[in-house]
Image (tube, rainbow, N blue to C red):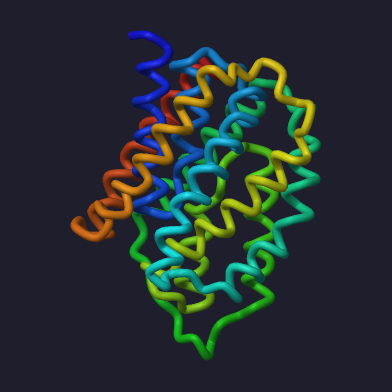
Amino acid sequence: MSALLLALAAGAAVGLALGALGGGGGILAVPALIYLLDFTPAAATTAALFIVATTSATALYAHARDGQVAWRTAALFSAAGVVPAYLAGAAAGDLPATALTVAFALVAAVAAVRMLRPARAAPVDRARPLQAAGVGAGLGAVTGFLGVGGGFLAVPALVGVLGVRMRQAIGTSLLVITVNALVALTARAGGGAGVDWAVVAPFTGAAVLAAWDGRRLAAKVSAVALRRIFAGVLLAVAAFMLVGTLV
């Protein structure tokens, strides 16, 4: 299969994940870029930041239009993650490829486990802003290092810590992802060596288009079913990356 077709297929999967779940796009984009399109881990995480930022911003528009974004909450998460995202993004280029790949696989496994756990909404009057800011800071660091948006962390935190409804948490997560990814990408300015933009462009285009379908899919399929399917995919990806790197 040609690189163009592989990029289009992988981009569609990333867009569906972001549109339907409010996260998970980077966790699919990075291994696809490495194993299907022969990017180095460093180039893949840089390219993934661009893909995730562009796709999340596009999906965000539709959710915002429907009133499914908690703007103040998103501002808290985003503000807490800006500095960690920038610092981690600047430092990511110094990580050995093996360490970056293993770290990414472990994060994918954690994301899968989080998605398999039932979401429990906390009452709004018991929300803990300091804990939310801590999660936002950690989210920014993960985004900077690994090129993932961190929606798999943001959505459960928004629901469980701040009591945001699931649909609104998905839309809010997209804003947080967009900000963190753009900040981390800025920190990596000039570090795009090895990024084949002729491949990344169609990958991103397919992701943007599929994000709209993902949003429609989320309205038709139960959130529990979507999360279980995606968790299974993430566990398979994590296992494949760990075996390929360590064996």
Q: Residue at x 28, y 49 (%)?
A: 228
Residue farthest along the left direction in this orientation:
220
Q: Position of residue 126 (x, y in %)?
A: 53, 87
Residue farthest along the bottom direction in this orientation:
125
Is 154 or 102 nearer to us in this picture? 154
> Does residue 12 lie above or below 124 as drawn?
above
Q: Position of residue 153 (x, y in %)?
A: 52, 56
Is 229 or 201 nearer to us in this picture? 201
Question: In which quadrant of the rendered image does the N terminus lie?
Answer: top left
Residue farthest along the top direction in this orientation:
1
Left-right relation of 134 to 204: right
Q: Residue at x 56, y 47 (%)?
A: 149
Q: Position of residue 236 (x, y in %)?
A: 36, 31
> Does residue 177 lie above or below 235 as drawn?
below
Q: Residue at x 52, y 33 (%)?
A: 105
Is 98 or 154 nearer to us in this picture? 154
> Does residue 34 lie above or below 82 as drawn?
above
Q: Residue at x 64, y 29 (%)?
A: 100
Name the quadrant containing residue 118.
bottom left
Left-right relation of 7 to 77: left
